[in-house]
Amino acid sequence: MDDFRKYIADIKDKLFKYQTEKRSKTYLALNENPYPFPEKLIEEVYKLIDPYKIPTYYDSPDEELLNLLLEYINSDKLSVKNLSIGNGADEIIYYLLLMFKEMKVTIFPPTYSCYKLFAKDIGSKVISIPLKEEKIPINEIENLLNVDSIVFIPNPNNPTGHFFEDEEIEFLLNTGALVIIDEAYYEFGKRSYIDWIDEYKNLVVIRTFSKAFSLAAQRIGYLVANEDLIDAYNRIRLPFNVDYVSQLFARVALKNLEFFRKRIEEIINEREKMKKELMSLGYKISNSQGNFVFMYLDTDSKEVLTREFEKKKIAIRKFSEGLRITIGTPKQNEMVLRIFMEVKKNENSKN
Ligand SMILES: Cc1ncc(COP(=O)(O)O)c(C=O)c1O
């Protein structure tokens, strides 16, 4: 019995726990969409549910979803054989790491925290090369990357929201490393590398329905890559990984693109407004192309701001480099801006 307890304790020590901010009334910590999935579209999903399908094992992905996804990615060089799905983009990241667990995982912080978390849990070696002024330090990694490497690039980057340049992506691809471009926030910046998949066999693009389509709870993401990689992915993933109803949600979302596009534009407008206001207050912000803003801060200003947000019960995400705040409803964004304005006013009155 004692041996068993020690065994569990040892395993626990080696595993990382996913942690996030406590839920609060104004929750701007996880880059969620501030708007609900519309009731009218939930009714559409409900009408599609076939009760006879519930007791059966359902295809993941189903053919209809694959065809809609193919239409959505809008690439004449690719077919449904270049697509598969996951229980959220996170599951896809996890499976890719599992598939290539012998490879060195390279990340460029500040970056999405789950790459390192999952890689460590799986037991892969992780190499962290910090970005320099939001650029990949190419000189430092020239001899580091090769066919035994797997590289994760969120584009737009999370947490800063900036886009990497074509030259940086090209450099990574030409090292022979497997390059995973995570386009979780694609719809808010509209720049994609899916069109490069035909040329680069070592390129994988991941996307999600969690952000632009207000479907984080339904857990649905997809990946695009060359046919062989997708075939391998379909072998490693669990056979029915994305459930029937979640797939119906994704299908209904893709059939109502006009509705979502309008909402996305509203969020983009709010983001641009927020960036402008923060800049005019004198904050050093990133040129975010996601549904969030990021500002670089020294430790003192970061602490002052964090306390003010805590006082107002607004959850945001703290990084060693600064703060990331999700774009919320116009009312929530106003609350956020008011905090920044008050903090600046206090700072100026002290000087
Ligand atoms: C860059 C990035 N990739 C992936 C995810 C996870 O997406 P999903 O909800 O589809 O698992 C997130 C979530 O915040 C993210 O920021």
Image (cartoon, rainbow, N blue to C red):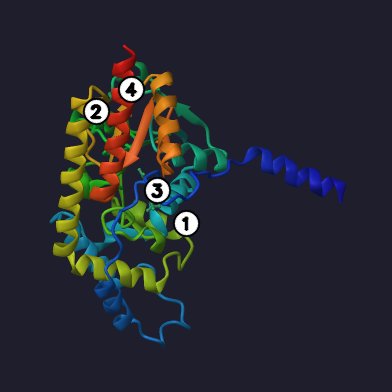
* Residue most extreme to the front: 349
Q: Amino acid at mark 2?
A: Glu
Q: Nearer the viewer, mark 4 or mark 2?
A: 4
- Residue 54's place in the image compared with 104, above or below, is below
Q: Earlier in the sequence, mark 2 or mark 3?
A: 3
Q: Amino acid at mark 1?
A: Ile
Q: Nearer the viewer, mark 3 or mark 4?
A: 4
Q: Which residue is label 2 attached to?
A: 168
Q: Nearer the viewer, residue 305 or 182?
A: 305
Q: Earlier in the sequence, mark 3 or mark 4?
A: 3
**Res. 217 image quadrant:** bottom left
Q: Which residue is label 4 attached to?
A: 346
Q: Residues within 10 Å of mark 4 (few under 14, many from 20)?
A: few
Q: Earlier in the sequence, mark 4 or mark 1?
A: 1
In the image, what residue occupies the spot 46% across and 27% down? 127
- Residue 223's place in the image compared with 301, above or below, is below
> Residue 269 appears at what percent x and percent y?
15, 45
Q: Nearer the viewer, mark 4 or mark 1?
A: 4
Q: Nearer the viewer, mark 3 or mark 1?
A: 3
**In whole angstroms, how far apart are the C-alphas of marks 4 and 1?**
55 Å
Task: Please tell me whether mark 4 sits on a helix, a strand or a loop.
Answer: helix
**In whole angstroms, how far apart are the C-alphas of marks 4 and 2?**
41 Å
Q: Nearer the viewer, residue 114 or 39?
A: 39
Q: Nearer the viewer, residue 211 or 54?
A: 211
Disc 4 CB within 8 Å of nearest ligand 1 atom: no
